Amino acid sequence: MAQRNSVVMVGLDPVYEKLPASLRQAAEGRGLPGFGGELWAIREFCERVIEAAGPLACCFKPQIAFFERYGSAGIAVLEEVLRGHRDHIFVVDCKRGDIGSTSEAYAKAYFHLEGQPEAPLACDAVTHNPYLGRDSIDPYLPYLRADKGMFLLAKTSNPSSVDFQDLIVGDIPLAERVAERISVWAEECIGDCGFSSIGMVVGATYPESALVIRKAAPRCLILVPGLETQGGSLDDARHFANLHGRGAVFNFARAIIYAYAGGPVAGQFGPEQWAECIGAAADYYRHRLNTALGL
Amino acid sequence: MAQRNSVVMVGLDPVYEKLPASLRQAAEGRGLPGFGGELWAIREFCERVIEAAGPLACCFKPQIAFFERYGSAGIAVLEEVLRGHRDHIFVVDCKRGDIGSTSEAYAKAYFHLEGQPEAPLACDAVTHNPYLGRDSIDPYLPYLRADKGMFLLAKTSNPSSVDFQDLIVGDIPLAERVAERISVWAEECIGDCGFSSIGMVVGATYPESALVIRKAAPRCLILVPGLETQGGSLDDARHFANLHGRGAVFNFARAIIYAYAGGPVAGQFGPEQWAECIGAAADYYRHRLNTALGL
């Protein structure tokens, strides 16, 4: 965040039907069998997004579902994307979370320590679903104490997050109780920057939760999904950050990667300039957030 | 369950180090690069387990983490296993669960409707983490109303499930509140057999939760992990079933697939008869459960 002067995380959520028309035409022209054309286009798209937005973003968040949707062939594309860009930070949004022995297997998919064989989906951080409790994260601790990170879901950005995350436990919502517990676990892996390698997810659509959680977990980085496209407002961004405007990273997926299809910068670019448009959108949100947070 | 006279689900949790020594030697003898040898052995092992236990089990539950651990190459092995055995029922234990647009992508990885292109990981049912609430399952409904199924986590079998699932909401634990809500959703897809295609997971290690949840959700099939190896007792099996001994399916992973390494039937077989031993273990638990449930 400091190096790039940016708290913008770019969500890599590639959906073939939404890719630029010229890219889809090029993919169809290749005459690849099965989903080969779609996957070629998705790979190409991710490369161009990373090239255009890379210098303006602090990190990328590939949502693995959009690759897993194609099975092993899709996962192979994600592996290539991750392997090709070790100069950027990648948070794989996989929301895994399982019993200890199983979580150990998941951890090996994403993380390795120095000197160990490279993990197939080697990345810098993952998201994690906390419903199974503490033993689901224990196998990740050796990695979290080295140079890897994890964002646990506290309050998610979707409308139905109210179903369970807002249930009242004692006198506070479950999401806040979960955040309290995560904050305690986070104390075990505080890094030189003062923040823990255990962070959490709090949706931009629930700024009132953010106010409470930010106070309860001062050492946790907060990953904030849901700004703009899902209805979260840039004006509320400061609720997720600390007094110095630090400690929060804001994910933009559709608002940046499909910026050419509409939004604040779309009008400045022709249809062939879709990559430039993506870069401009990343820069637009970088400036807006830096201003909102006083950075 | 009726066709095979079995409520045994066999968990496919292949861990290379635990595979039979002869199989590991054969794998090493092939001189494949990278994880090729391990994956060859895992593929072979799954085939032999399915062959040996197939007639004695009502279904198989591959835990995707043990394949994902190898990245796309591991997922490709799982795809081959699933594709090769359409005569068996497969519940892929993936515990995905995300916001609506993302859940839609996950659903396409595992399910397709008749006449649609085959899903890459096509299977009969998946497990699902409910923390994100109702809109995380909405994209699955067309499939659930056809011939697919889903088991949502209510109370998991691991020790740390107490961390959040036992928090008191109103006057009952969160897991029971989640189960109540799942039971309401389940009413939307009741099949000819009287059970819903939306079921839930309740760990064998918490039979007291099962008693409550079974009553609250009579139409839900309960997937019960954690018998034997994790400490759940066969004597409590009836707490998970209805009055007729129906409605519960019991997963055995290590207790069956590594039966040759120890357990009630290990002594009857030599080291080369590991597949026969796996079949015998499946039959042993089939009989034990049928007796316990009065089937």
Image (cartoon, coloured by chain):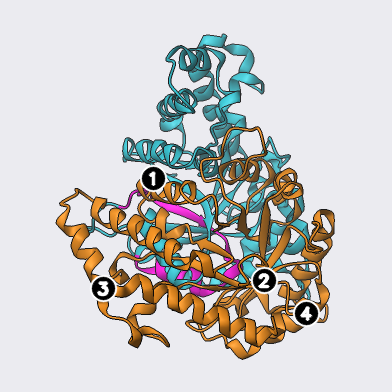
Chain colours: A cyan, B orange
Q: Amino acid at mark 4?
A: His
Indicate the chain on which mark 4 is placed: B
Q: How much space separates mark 1 and mark 2, taking CA atoms?
A: 36 Å
Q: Secondary structure at mark 4?
A: loop
Badge 4 local density, few (<14 within 10 Å), some, or many (20+)? Answer: few
Q: Amino acid at mark 2?
A: Arg
Observer-side mark, 3 or 2, equals 3
Are dots 1 and 2 on a single chain?
A: no
Indicate the chain on which mark 2 is placed: A
Q: How much space separates mark 4 and mark 3, taking CA atoms?
A: 40 Å
Q: Which label sits on residue B244?
A: 4
Which residue is drawn at the image coordinates 84% and 59% (left, top)? Answer: B187
Q: How much space separates mark 3 and mark 2, taking CA atoms?
A: 52 Å
Q: Which residues are magenta?
A: A119-142
Q: Secondary structure at mark 3?
A: helix
Q: Secondary structure at mark 2?
A: helix
